[in-house]
Structure formats: C-alpha cells, structure tokens
Amino acid sequence: MSASRVSNVSFHVSNLLDKMTSSDKDFRFMATNDLMLELQKDSTKLDEDSERKVVTMVLRLLEDKNGEVQNLAVRCLAPLVSKVKEPQVETMVDTLCSNMTSDKEPLRDISSMGLKAVIAELPLSSLGSSLTVGVCKKITSQLMAALENQEDVSVQLEALDILSDMLGRLSGALVSFHSSLLSSLLLQLTSPRMAVRKRSILALGHLVPCCSPALFAQLTEHLMTELAKDPPTSMTRTYIQCLATVSRQGGHHVGEHLEKLIPMVVSFICVEDDELIEFCLQAFEAFIRRCPMEMSPHIPTVTRLCLKFMTFDPNYNYDEEEEEEEEDSMDVEDGLEEDEAYSDDDDMSWKVRRSSIKCLEALMDARRDLLLSFYSSICPALLARFKEREDNVRADVFAAFSTLLRQTRAASNRGGLGAASEPAASREEEEEEPGVVPLIVKALHRQLKEKSIKHRHGCFTLLTDLSHTAPGALEPHIPALIPGIIFSLTDRSTSSTMRIDALSFFHVLLLSHPPQVFQPHMRVLLPPVVACVEDSFYKITSEALLVAQQLVRVMKAPAQSTTASGIDPVFPIILKRLKAADIDQEVKERAISCTGHLVCHLGDHLGVELVGVLAIFLERLRNEITRLTAVRTITLISASPLKIDLASILPETLSVLGSFLRKNQRALKLATLACLTALVQHHAAGIKPAALEPVLSELPALVDESDMHFNMLHVSISLLTSMSRACSSSVAKICSSVLPDVFRLVHSPLLQGGALAAILDFLQALVQSKTNNLGYSQLLKSLTDPFHTSQSSLLHKQSYQSVARCVAALASSCPSQTPATVAGLLQEVRGSSPESARVLALLCLGEVGRSGSLGASKDVQGVILEAISSSNEEVKTAASCALGSMAVGSLDDYLPFLLKEISSQPRRQYLLLHSLKEVISACAASSLSPHVESIWTLLLRYCECDEEGTRNLVAECLGKLTLVKAAQLLPRLRQQLTAGRSSPLTRSTVLTAVKFTIVDQPAAIDVLLLCSAGDFLKTLQDEDINVRRVSLVMFNSAVHNKPSLIRGLLATVLPHLYRETQIRKDLIREVEMGPFKHSVDEGLDLRKAAFEVMYSLLDGSLEGLDLLQFLDHVEEGLKDHYDIRMLTFLMLARLASLCPAAVLQRLDRLIEPLKATCTTKVKAGSVKQEFEKQEELRRSAMRAVAALLAVPGMERSPSLADFANQIRTNADMASIYQSVQGGEGPVESMDIS
C-alpha cells in the first residue's frame, strides 16, 4: 500500500478518535460505528501510532456510560486483532482480563464478551502463529489466577466459559499449561456451587482430546480416588458426570482405564438417586461409543443394568392401563388422557429410562456383530416399552428400535452374499424378524390413532424402517395398519408434516407389498389420497401423487375388476393437476408420471379423454422444464400391454424426440433413445419413413467409441436394431449413414460387454432384412478386410475377438452359408495368409464352433493341432482359444480329443490346458457332469508340475471343475491337503484351486466352503513358505468375495496372519554381485500377501478385528519395504474414515513413520528410479496425512498439529500436500481447525 493511502487512513481514523471523546453520545456512537466499518475493510492498514491510539480508545469505550457505544466497542475488538501488531493485542488482552475481575458487573460482562471475540479471531495455533501462543498464555495465566483467587461466582463462571472457548479452539497453543489447567479445573470440581462444577466439567471435556495420555491417566486416577472416598451424593454426581464427559470427548484415551472404571460406575448405579443413575448410564453410553471392542467383557453387565432401568417408573402402574386396553379401545384413550393429566413435574425417573434406552441404542449401533443376541435380549424389552407414557422417552424407544432394524438391514446386505453362504447366526437373525413383526404391529397400530403428533411420527418412522428391512413382512397386518394411515390423512387437527409422514409410509408400503393385498381396502383408501392430491400445500400433493401412482397398479391388478366408474374419483383430480401450469415443479413432474401410469394401466377406460391427455403430454414434451419426465412417461405408455393408440401425437413426438438427440444433456438423450426404441418396437405400423428422418440424421453422432463404457452407445445400437427389424424401408438409410461407424466400432479395442452384444443383434437384423448390398457376403467382407491389409498390425487384440463374434453371429443367422464360411476359414489358416488373417480365422472357427455348427470334423482337428504347433505365438494362442470354444459347442466330439492331446503332448500342454479351462468355464454343469471324473484324474496328475504357469492353470481348472460337483470334489481337495505324502507343490496347487471356488456371486458350494474354510486356513501354519503365501492369497480371496466364510474363524486365524507381517531375519540373505553386496528378502512376498489380506479385511470384516492390535501391525508396515509402505499408507487413510476413534488412540505412534517418510531424502548420486520411488512414497504418505486431517477431532492431537505446521512451513512438503489435495487453493487453506 502506498504511503499516501496509509496517511489518508490515519487522518480519517484520527478524526474518528476525536469524535469518540465527545460528550454527545450520538457522536460517540456514530464515530465508533464508522471505525468498526473501517476496520472491517481488508484494505485498511494502520501505522504504529494509530494502532496504539485506536486500541486505547476502544478499550476506554468499553467503560462508556452508553450501552450501545459499549456494544459497538466490543464489535471493534475482533477486526482489530488482525489489524494491529502483537504488543497491542497483548495490551487489549491485559486490559480485558483485569476488567474481568472488576467490581463493576456491567464492565465484567462486556470485557468477557470482548475476550471471547478476541479468542475467536486469533489465528489457529496449528498454523504456527506466535501471536496466538503468546496471547493464549497471557489469557490463561490471568484466568487461572482469577479462578483461584476470586470468591465471586459470576467471575469464576465467566472465566470457565472463556477457558472452554479457548481450549475448544486453540488447545495446541496451551500445551505447556495443560497440567496446571487440569489442577485448577479439578479444584473447581469441589466448588459448593453446581454451576461452577458444571462449567468446569465442560472445560475438562475440551481439554482431554488434546492432552497427553499421561495427563488423561492423571485425570481418571483423580476421579477414581475421589469416588473411592465415598463423597456426598451431590459430589458423586459431579465426578460421574465428569467421567462421562471426558470419556465422550477424549474417548481414545479411556480404553486402557476401563477395567478400573466400569466396576466403580457399576457400584454407584445402585445408589437410589435418579440423577446419579442417569449420569452412570451416560458414562456407559460414552464408553460403548468410544471403545466398543474394549467394552466386550462388560457388555452383559451394562445390558442387564439398562434393561433394568429402562422400566424404572416407580410412580406409575402400567398394569392398570393394560387392563383398560383389554376392556375397550375407548378406555385406552381415556387412560392416555389420564396419563397426560397425571404427569408429575417433580418426577425425574423418565431421565433414567431415557438414558438407559440411549445406552442400549449406542450398544446396537456400535456392535452389529452381536445382533443375534440383541434380538433375544433387547428386542422384547424395547417392544414392551412401546407403551412408555413420556413422549420424549417413547420417541427414544422408537429411535432405538429403528437402529436395531437398520443394523439388521446392514447385516443382511453386507458383502453381497446369498443366504447359502451366510453364517448360521445371520440366518437366525432373518428368522427372528417374522416373529417380531406381529408384536410390533400389535404395539403400534393403536398408537397410530393417538392425538400425539410425536407418537404417530415415531410409529410411521419405525414402520417405514421395518418395511425397508423386511419387505413384504407387513402383508398379514395391512388391515390393522390402514385405519391408522387414514386417520392421519383425514384428521383435521393433523399437521401437514404428519400427513406427509403418513403418505410417505403408505408409499413405501405399496412398493414393498403385492398389489392384491390392498384391493379389498380401495374404497376407503382412495378418497383420503384423492383429497391429499387436491391439497393446497405442494409437498402433500407431491407425496399423494406418488401414492396415487402406486394405487393405479392396485386398481389394475388381476383380481381387481376395474371399470370406468372405478377410476372416476381419481382421474379428474389428477388431470386437473396435470393441466395446471402455475404449480410447483415437483408436483408438475409427479402429475405427469402419475397420469402416465394411469394411461398405461387403465387407458382403455378413458375413452374420449385419452386424446386430450396425450395432447397435454406432447405439450409437456415441448417444455424444457418437464420434457425429461414427459419422455419417460411416453416410453411407459408406448410399451403398455393395452396398445394405446398414439396416432394423434406420433409424428410430432418423433420430430421433437429427434431434436432432443442434439441436446447436451446425457439423461435426456438416454431417455429419448429408450423412448424411440419403444415407439419403433410397438408402434412401427403407424410410423411413416419420413417421420424417422430427424432421428436418423442425429444417430451417426451417437455411434461413437468415446461413449463405449457408458450406456448411450448400447441404447443407440439397440434403436438401430429395432428400426432395422420393424421399419424395413429405413434400412438403406441406416446403412448409408451409420454402418461405417458401426464397423469402426467393431474394430475398436474398447468394444465389449453390452455394446458388443447390441452390435451382434444389429448385424443379425441387417442380414435378415435381405436388403440389397447388405447380404451375408458383403457384411462378412467388411468385417474381415482390415485384417488382410498392411495396416492389420495396428489392430488391437480385442478387435480380433469382436470380429470373430460378429462373424459367428452372421453365420448363425444364415445356416446355409456356414459350411462355405468354415471351408474358407480353414483355407485361410492353412494358406499363406498374413498372420493377422490366420489368427482371425482361427478365432472365427472357434466362435462358429461354440454354437455347435462344426461337428466332429477330423479336418478341423488337424488344422487346429497344426496351428498349435506353429512357431508363431499369436497363432498358437488363437488355436488354443479356438479349440476350447469348439469343445464348448460340441463336447462329446472334442473333449476326449482334447484330454488325449493333453496327456500325449507335453510340449503343447500349457496351450491345451488353456483350451480345457475355456471348456470348464463356459460349459453348463449338466453337460460337463459325465466328463468330470476323467478331467479330474488328468488334472491331479499335473499338480506337481515343475512349471509354475502350468500349475496355476491346473489349479484354476480344478477350482472351476469343483463348482460343477461341489459335494463330491471339495472333500477330495481337502483330502489332498491332509494326505501325509502330499508335496508342497501339490498343497499350493490345491489352495490355488480353492481360491477359484470362491466366486463373488452366491453359489451352491458356499455352504460346503463354510464348513471347510477352517481346514484350508490351517495351511497358514504350513512349514513351506510358498504354501503359506498361497494360503494367504486364498484367504484374501475369501475376505474379498465371501467375508461370511471367514468371519467366525478370525479369532483363530488372525494371530497366524499377523505373524506373517513380521520381518524375519532368517529369510534375509546377502548376495554378492561383483564388489557389491545385495540383500535378498525371501519373506517379502509373504509379508505383502499378509498386508493385502489386512487391507481386504477392512471392507467386510471390520467388526471382527481388535483395531488396536490391527493398528500395531499397520504401524510396523509403515516402516517396512517400499511396496508394503505404499499399501499401509492406503490402509491408514481407510482406517481414518472407518474407525477414527481407534486411529486417534495410536495417532502419536503413527505420525512418526509418516513424518520420517515425508522428510527422508534420497542420497545424491542415486539412480533415477530411487528418486521416483521416494517421491511416490512421499505422495502416498501425504495422502494418508490428508485423510487424517480430514477427520473431525484429529487436529486436536499436538503431534499431528505440529506435523501439519511443519508441512505448511516447508515449501517442498507444502507443494506435495497441495498436489495430493487436487491443487485446490494455497496451502495456507489447510484446515486443521
């Protein structure tokens, strides 16, 4: 800033300061306000003299007689912190702190507000600001003195408030004061004033997350010592409440003290004091949430206590209410009214019940692995508490039960496993649900008619969770639930929110149950839903339209005989919403969708109204806001089984849809293509060739390989196929505009999956259309010509497979041409064609043979064997693939020949085994079964082959063959392991085979694997290092694909896994290479395999791990070899998001290897690869640091805060951090606040 600018600001500020001394309060007010505005400007800079004068004047105005001037002066303090130098900030702080102890109460209050404003503006201590550290020390020392010397309670309360603020935001700057702060705050816990004790507890809660483990141990020891003295009940309450707070805030420290704390808390929960019991239960909840695994030995005790106290209601007799319920439903309502009249303001027992229920909810949330025991112990107790009389407590009961249902849903979804592979416990969980559902409905259906909005909201939320967890389970209870739904929709006193809740639950109910269930109730269901569609509040209308859309499905269901009069109550109201232009966007879209479903399912009852409705759809199609919904609706109507007549809108609709294909909106283009396909497939007779012109002109741009991995290409080709089959007059136009692009796609290396399948259908449709210039031979020539040119070397391997499948598709469409095609392909293989043409011919023979079109031709077998013996590797590989494909198509003809060749041709064995693998993988189990024994015998013969590649192929074949007859073959694999004479090579081959039996989809073998997994994993203790490595690979496959197989074995298997993560010196040997010595670590691959298993365990088996023990091994991996460090950095980042509390407990130990990696430099003169490896290590480590910093609460660790400051101040590390963050903004923006 220029000197003149500073001078102008100083002059302006000087004038304002003069006005602030005026005796007129309005002058002082305006001048202070102008100063505040000036200070808030980023461009304002003060010279040293102005800084001093402004600070002095603002501090003086804090004592102004006018309250408004005082308030403005306080608002000036915050911007001043960033405008003045450190000495002036210290002056402000000194004055404010001294004012805090003034006899004048207004000055104390205004100074307290000022101090809080200054603290809020100080730079974060983690950013390395000396200002923050200095100012915090000044404030802390003076506040601690005020705490100890002041007898005025209001001063103590303000001091504790400010300390809490400072510890919560700037604890890193107060590390040197932590010990003295702890002593001072513990002293305040003995204050006779309850308010002082509570504020001290809050301050301690802010202190513990960033204090050292030793200090936390000192705090817990002090609390336990004081509690052991059997203090008065009021002090006991304070200490237990403090224990709960520090456990909640600094839970990562509390785990190691649980063994001493739990018995003490259990002893005090037996005291007859409601508030003390509440605090004890809150302490249990904090322990469970922060240290769920460490609490394992104490869970039975805590559960028993919670179940006891959740029914603690000494002033009310529930039995009387139950008798009334049995007599008459009206008596129930009277009883409830009596409840409300009874409510006693002095009765605090509800707090005990609420705390126990929240503790149980925490337990169910934190320990999903104990779900089965929750259903037997906690679930019945919660169901019994649905009758709870206090609104707040009953809401907590509903919330706790919803947590149980959500955990059940998560448990059934984990790992994507089928029922066959789930452990017995999981299956029993599912069996629990049907028995629980009637009890839930029995307890809730009456409450759905209660006057209390809160109760009904809880009921609907819980029932919605139940419908999601067990779809269809409420089917027998629909008659009991419908009156409650109708009551909430029709009751005049019901709020809008309640009606939305009822509609939302009804919608979920309709989606998760068959339509027939609701048909008997349609007379009572329709009127309230229709009334909601007419409601003036758009959110109710929107939800009601969703429900009406599903009710249309009910009206159309087979058992329902719908007549024109049946839809009379619904159609006019929905049509009114469809026509309205001045309604909410969401209502517009749902009205279109609802009307579309009505036309699709009941359009034959609309008569003359149908044309008008279709015209509105066309209008909405032209509207930019509603066009996407309109496209989807027209798609639905087009495919209607009622064959709705669209002639009135078809030409214009096609024109508009063609224009949509030009829009740069992916969702719209995909929906448009689907709509066009439906129209062409179902309404081709009404489409004139000219109407398709706008569409055909836009399609070439969509047939593009850049969209290969998305759905657009697939849908575009499917549309072309439909047009080729349904609109034969358009085929010539299709060919001239699109066919060159299709052939370009076929030769693309990216073509696969759905897009390839769509092209196969398209080519078959073309050849079947018998259009001129599109015959079999022309298409075949266009496909294969590029492989006969000099440019064939540029074609990717994938394009060979794609063209081969296209040729086979054409051959299957023209069986009469197949013999000539096969003869031509055989001639290509035999002849002197280019290598690319021979490879393609072999692959084409294989694909044609896959359909069974070749038969048992000796000629073909001879050509294939000759090709397998070729000196050209590409030709040999293609011949191997071709033989396997032919055998799939004609098993009896080719499999015996293949097995014979494997036995008699050792030199061709590897390629022939590839062919056999294709046969086993692609053949149906029923057709392969007769040949299983002969294949199995052959494969076992080669288990000990010296060539590792051959052994791996044999293992894959064995594994996939086992899937065919699992009950017979899996025990044989297990027997091969236990046979005393089996060699290490056989054991490793068998374990690799087992790996291939573990597929990611549910399979019949899963139950057998569950019983055998323990036997296979015993090989982790094998004496051969290679067998142990293969066993770990198999273990990793199980963890990744079928976690349920190993969940029950983790306790016995993990010690062996962790043992393999250790560096073993006996496996490290030195190799002399000329004048140099080089270390070879033969255990490296074994350790890598072990750490890979650990990484996989984080996905589906986290609950079975002792996280602290797991982190100990991660910590060791952070110091290991390059490959292992890269993996453990990833693990650490994942752990930070999955279980931050456990990582926080080990954070100080984990930071050191991260810091070492980031600061290590490669020796000068090292090779380029060393520099690159170190750079990649640093980047991976920095990603782990970024993941740690992103977790709330991590920044309060002093070690992490120091490292973050080191990164910020080091240009090299700062640039790496910024790059791994995506280069967003300057590194100063690193938020660790």
Image (spheres, helix red, strand yellow):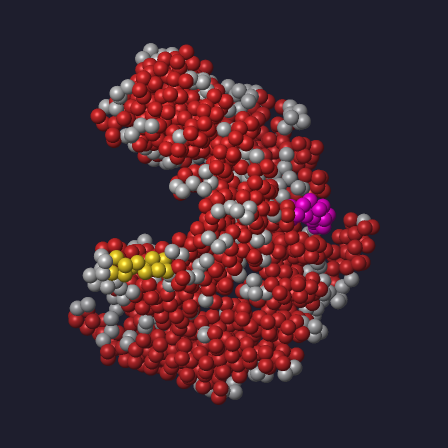
Residue 123, given in percent of the width and then of the height, sits at: 34, 70
Question: Which segment did they paint magenta?
Answer: 428-448
Q: Nearer the viewer, residue 181 or 835?
A: 835
- 511 in magenta: no
Which x, y percent locates residue 889? 46, 23
Q: Residue furthest front?
A: 981
Residue 503 makes an appearance in the image: no
The residue lying toward the viewer, choosing from 154 and 61, is 154
| Residue 60 visible from this viewpoint | yes
Quarter of image, res 726 = top left
- Place of residue 1081 in the rendered image (x, y in percent of width and height, measured from the top left): 36, 58
| Left or right of residue 1110: residue 263 | right
Residue 433: say if magenta.
yes
Q: Quadrant of residue 1200?
A: bottom left
Task: Name the residue rendered at 64%, 73% in the picture.
Answer: 263
Q: Which image quadrant is residue 545 in?
A: top right
Q: Position of residue 721 (x, y in %)?
A: 41, 21
Q: Quadrant of the C terminus?
A: bottom left
At 46% from the left and 38% from the top, the residue drawn is 942
Classified by dominant secondary structure, the portion drawn in magenta counts as: helix
